[in-house]
Structures are given as structure tokens and as C-alpha cells.
Amino acid sequence: MEKIKVLFVCDDNSLRSPMAEAWLNHLGQGDFLARSAGFEPAAINPLAVEVMGEVGLDISGHKGRSVFELYTAGELFSYVITMCDPATAERCPIFPGVTRVANWPFPDPTREKIPETEKKQKLREIRDLIRERVERFIQMIRPDAHD
């Protein structure tokens, strides 16, 4: 069976989209091939690496990718899921083929002017919410998938 290709997109591909990519590749039982990209790719956020490491997922080797490079390379995805505010999501190119687009808006607490410990706690909450959203997505696409 061919894997279902999913692209997660956020602003800089350093936080939310790499977390979603890791969750889907981990929980998808080999049925999915998740990738992530951003509009202005940056290095992976160390807090994202830390909070994902707390649940046993290592994303430290993640390299930021440009959504536009994937588009111009002709990459085909069954689903493109944006993880930023709707205004930013509108910048996402239309991918060729049969692509469904969805928006899962999650904030970026690392951009807030709050103490590091509070940023980390908010990021843990977002990590867990992304996991829940990915689990629901898997159940929607593959209702026969088991935990």
C-alpha cells in the first residue's frame, strides 16, 4: 500500500510543523509519510527539541525546508496542513494533484515575552494538542488503524 503523503507548514519550520511531522511519522504505523516546511525556514527551535525529547521523539536533526522549494520541485502531497494563523496560511502555494488543505492554528509561545519556564510549559501543552490532532487525523483517514 502506498503511503499517504502529508505536508505540515508553519512560518519558519522550526517549531510546530516539525513537531507534527514527528508525531505523524511516529503514530502513523507506516501508513503515512509526513514532511514539514516553512515560508522562511530556520533552524529547529531548541525548546521544541527539548519538549519532544521528553516524550521520546528526537527532532534535533531536523533541517528547515522551504515550502516553495517543495512546490517548485513538484512534490505531491495528499494533504497540506498549515499550522499558523489563517492570514499566513493563505501564502501557502497550491500544490498540484489531489491535495486537501486544512488549517490547524497553533500559537508560537516562543515569540511571547514571557519567562523561559512559561514558554516551555506552553510548548508542552501545544506538543500534546498537536499529538491529539494527529491522532484524530489518523483515525479520520485510517479508521481501521489501531493504537
Image (spheres, rainbow, N blue to C red):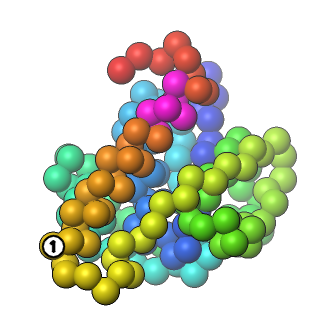
Q: Residues within 10 Å of mark 1 (few under 14, many from 20)?
A: few
Give the quadrant of the C terminus. top left
Position of residue 69 in the picture relative to residue 137 (left or right): right
Q: Regarding mark 1 in the picture, which secondary structure is present there?
A: helix
Is residue 103 in view from this perspective?
yes
**At x 38% / y 81%, what residue is drawn?**
111
| 130 w.r.t. 145: above or below | below
Would you identify the image quadrant in which residue 83 lies?
Answer: bottom right
Q: Nearer the viewer, residue 121 or 8?
A: 121
Q: Nearer the viewer, residue 99 or 130?
A: 130
**Spot occupied by residue 43 in the image (x, y as percentages of width and height):** 40, 78
| 91 w.r.t. 74: above or below | below
Q: Is residue 136 magenta?
A: yes
Give the quadrant of the N terminus. top right
**Spot occupied by residue 108 in the image (x, y as percentages of width and height):** 42, 71
**Spot occupied by residue 62 in the image (x, y as percentages of width and height):** 39, 65
| 111 w.r.t. 101: above or below | below
Stretch in magenta: 134-139
Is residue 60 in view from this perspective?
no
Mark 1 — residue? 117
**Spot occupied by residue 50 in the image (x, y as percentages of width and height):** 20, 64
**At x 77% / y 45%, what residue is drawn?**
99
**At x 47% / y 41%, what residue is drawn?**
133
**At x 72% / y 49%, what residue is drawn?**
101
Would you identify the image quadrant in which residue 68 lies?
Answer: bottom right
Residue type indicated by callout 1: Thr
What is the residue that sits farthest to the top in this orientation? 144
